[in-house]
Image (cartoon, rainbow, N blue to C red):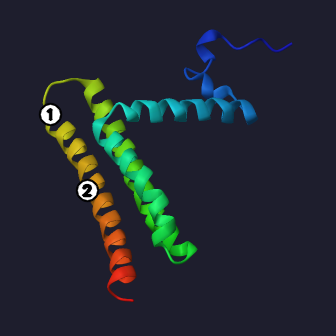
């Protein structure tokens, strides 16, 4: 008769032991909590409000499903990268408030990723607007 695993053998994260729909259900809850946490960040809120305008506008501006997908996708990418950057900053801040070169470097790279995502989004939207209104 096999013995039951000792408490020390239990996974530290209960999510790891879940399977099937139970795992998906809990993962969805964690994702919603992540969005709520993101909403507490000013930059994410600004991007979310912009998305509320830009996502419907992408349907009007795009002339094909590919254009709509590029316009809407570029907006969503900005929000995704912002959430990842916030995650990096939060993890670094948990380690400690003291200044460290590697902490600064990680935060700077997260910020640079947001900048690149914003530039990509702006470039896609500028090209679409130019095509729509100035190029015929």
| Residue projecting furthest to the right | 1
Position of 136 relative to 35 (above/below) = below
The residue lying at 67 percent from left, 32 percent from top is 25
Residue in view at x 14 percent, y 25 percent: 98
Q: Does residue 81 show up?
A: no
* Tag 2 residue: 115
Can you see residue 60?
Answer: yes
Q: Is residue 96 left or right of residue 36?
A: left
- Could you tell whether 88 is left or right of 13 in the image? left
Q: What residue is shown at x 86% (from left), y 12% (from top)?
A: 1
The nearer-to-camera label among 1 and 2 is 2
Q: Quadrant of residue 106?
A: top left
| Residue at image coords 78%, 11% | 3
| Label 2, residues with CA under 10 Å away: few <14, some 14-19, many ≥20 | some
* As drawn, 123 above or below 35: below
Is the residue 37 above or below the residue 118 in the image?
above
Tell which residue pokes out farthest to the bottom in this image: 136
Classify residue 18 as left or right of residue 122. Answer: right
Q: Between residues 67 and 95, which one lies in front from this camera angle? A: 67
Q: x and y percent of residue 31 in the render? A: 53, 35
Residue closest to the eye, 55 or 30 = 55
Could you say where residue 49 lies in the image, as x and y percent from the top left? 38, 46
Is the residue marked by circle 1 packed among few (<14), some (14-19), or many (20+) residues within 10 Å? few
Q: Nearer the viewer, residue 63 or 30?
A: 63
Percent x, y for residue 127? 34, 77
Q: Quadrant of residue 135?
A: bottom left
| Label 1 with label 2: CB-CB less than 8 Å | no
The residue tagged with tag 1: helix, strand or loop? loop
Provide the residue designation for mark 1.
100
């Amino acid at each position: 008769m096999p013995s039951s695993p000792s408490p020390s053998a239990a996974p530290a994260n209960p999510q790891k032991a879940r399977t099937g729909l139970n795992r998906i259900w809990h993962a969805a809850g964690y994702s919603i909590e992540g969005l709520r946490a993101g909403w507490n960040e000013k930059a994410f809120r600004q991007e979310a409000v912009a998305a509320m305008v830009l996502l419907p506008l992408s349907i009007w501006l795009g002339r094909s499903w590919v254009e709509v997908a590029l316009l809407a996708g570029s907006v969503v990418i900005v929000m995704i990268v912002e959430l990842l950057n916030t995650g990096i900053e939060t993890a670094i801040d948990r380690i400690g408030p003291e200044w460290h070169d590697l902490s600064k470097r990680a935060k700077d790279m997260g910020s640079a990723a947001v900048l690149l995502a914003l530039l990509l989004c702006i470039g896609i939207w500028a090209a679409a607007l130019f095509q729509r209104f100035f190029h015929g």
